[in-house]
Image (tube, rainbow, N blue to C red):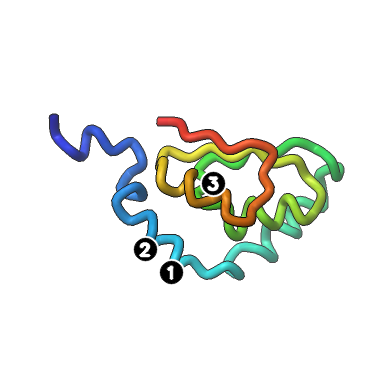
Amino acid sequence: MNESLQDKSNGYEAAARQFMASRNPQIGTHTVREWSRGIARGSTILDLGCGHGVPISQVLIDEGFDVYGVDASPTLIALNFSGVRLTEWLQWD
């Protein structure tokens, strides 16, 4: 079978470790904090395409939300357990 048809993560699976190493943990945090001010603390948020959870899921958790993360890359899901306290992680393709 064609490899591109098997990778449901749009290439993130193949580049997972490089993506994690190069992802700036500050990009997007201000925007997410601003956006989340309109949502009641303790609410549940579904983070589709959460990757390894940094920085977006982590910011939401720090702001008091219950976050469920879903990503198509099994590697990113496996690696996201290193410090991010999501309510639940799910690999989904």
- Mark identifier at residue 59: none
Residue type at mark 3 is Cys
Q: Quadrant of residue 1?
A: top left
Residue type at mark 1 is Ser
Q: Are marks 1 and 2 in contact (CB under 8 Å)?
A: yes
Whole-Å distance between the Cαs marked 1 and 2?
6 Å
- Mark identifier at residue 50: 3
Residue highlighted by disc 1: 22
Residue highlighted by disc 2: 18
Residue 64 place in picture, x, y as percent: 82, 49
**Residue at the (32%, 56%) spot, across then down:** 15
Q: Are marks 1 and 3 in contact (CB under 8 Å)?
A: no
- Identify the element where label 3 is drawn: loop
Horizontal side, residue 16 vs residue 24: left or right = left
Q: Please, which residue is most extreme toward the left here? A: 1
Viewer-proximal residue among 68 and 36: 68
Mark 3 Cα within 10 Å, few/some/many (few <14, many 20+)? many
Residue 39 place in picture, x, y as percent: 81, 44
Whole-Å distance between the Cαs marked 2 and 3?
16 Å
